[in-house]
Image: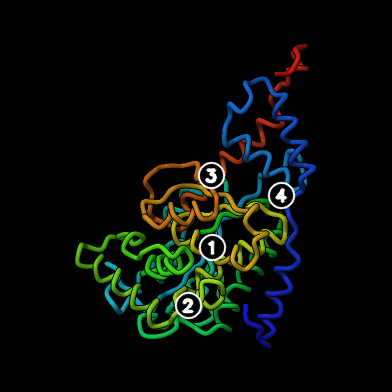
Amino acid sequence: MQQLNSSHHLQLESLTRLISLPDETLEQQARDRIDQLTKPPGSLGLLEEMAIRLAGITGEQTPDMSKKAIVVCCGDHGVVEEGVTAYPSEVTEKMMANFAAGGAAINVIARQTKADVYVLDVGSRARTVPDGVIDCKVRPGTDNMASGPAMSRDEAVQAVMTGVEMARRLKQEGVRVIGVGEMGIGNTTPATAIAAVITGSPVDQLTGRGAGVDDAGMLRKIRVIEQAIRVNQPDPQDPVDVLAKVGGLEIAAMAGVMLGGALERMPVVIDGLISTSAAMIAVGLSERVKPYLFASHLSEEPAHRILLEKLGLTPLIHARMRLGEGTGAALLFPMMEAAVALMREMATFADLGLEGP
């Protein structure tokens, strides 16, 4: 990362150095406990791995996962004017109001999984932020990345810090696990651009239909992403440069939530393509974020699988979802709670008077 004088930049750099790795001793204790449970070794698959990782992250062998939150970061995108999406930017504002009123898909799923939903306006074009939405707007939407940088470096870092501060606030409020979602018409375009820059994969192999563009729209979207990368020449080794040139404000904020979660030793559940592109940025800022991330599901967007493979994360849910909002992340919460409950409540071989496997 380039050295800049901004207080936000200095603060971000100092925070990334404070992130500690999960506790390996607790992980080993959890592994030993799981190996003594009344089941064939490894028979609970990824649930076992999840329980072990949660112990190391939280520093507790059977962590309390009862207080859960979904953070929905919202922002608009100047690239929408290139015709890369089937919906107008005004829908972002309408959906923020819908989140606040409890009527969106994420609200319904969060109620089922007993999670609270926090909605952040980091960069929408809404002149008035709806009641119930947290106003932390850095600027009203990005510029058109097809003709120049989406935003400045300072704005990108400010949006990241907004997410960091939100995660730290939730930790203070007793939240134990965070799911990260988003809303921003057109945001599969910057997310795919980020994926192309960081992975080096061809744009046409990464690009999906987003909210439902037709064949002509797909070709236009591919051309626009290629043009944005060509015009801006983002440096794949500099995550802030990538964010500023071809990213989005809500993507930056989600990356910040992930950084903040790692800093506070909280597990963070990522959702689909857009939040996973944010995870790539967060891990680019600090490799130590990676052990704190959990992949919830595999999106229908083609870039999602490639990004998850790059991160080394395995999604547990394959439901052909592509909505966003944090819906997939919220669905993972019951599985996380089940993993911890198995560790806490299952009998051991010793309890039955048997030798272990």
On the image, the x and y values in percent for residue 254 come to 55, 65
Label located before the other in sequence (4 or 2): 4
- Give the SS element for disc 3: helix
In the rendered image, residue 337, in percent from the top left (x then y), is placed at 62, 39
- Identify whether 321 is placed above or below 72: above
Residue 234, disc = 2
Badge 1: few (under 14), some or many (20 or more) residues near its Cα, within 10 Å?
Answer: many
Question: Which of the labelled discs sits on residue 57, or is there none?
Answer: 4
Mark 1–mark 3 distance (CA, rounded to whole Å) = 20 Å
Q: Residues within 10 Å of mark 4 (few under 14, many from 20)?
A: many
Tag 1 secondary structure? helix
Mark 3 neighbour class, 10 Å CA radius: few under 14, some 14 to 19, many 20 or more: many
Q: Foreground mark, 3 or 2?
A: 2
Q: Can you give x and y, in whole percent of width and height, for residue 294 in the image?
A: 57, 49
Which residue, given by chain and number where applicable, does mark 1 sit on? 280
Q: Earlier in the sequence, mark 3 or mark 4?
A: 4
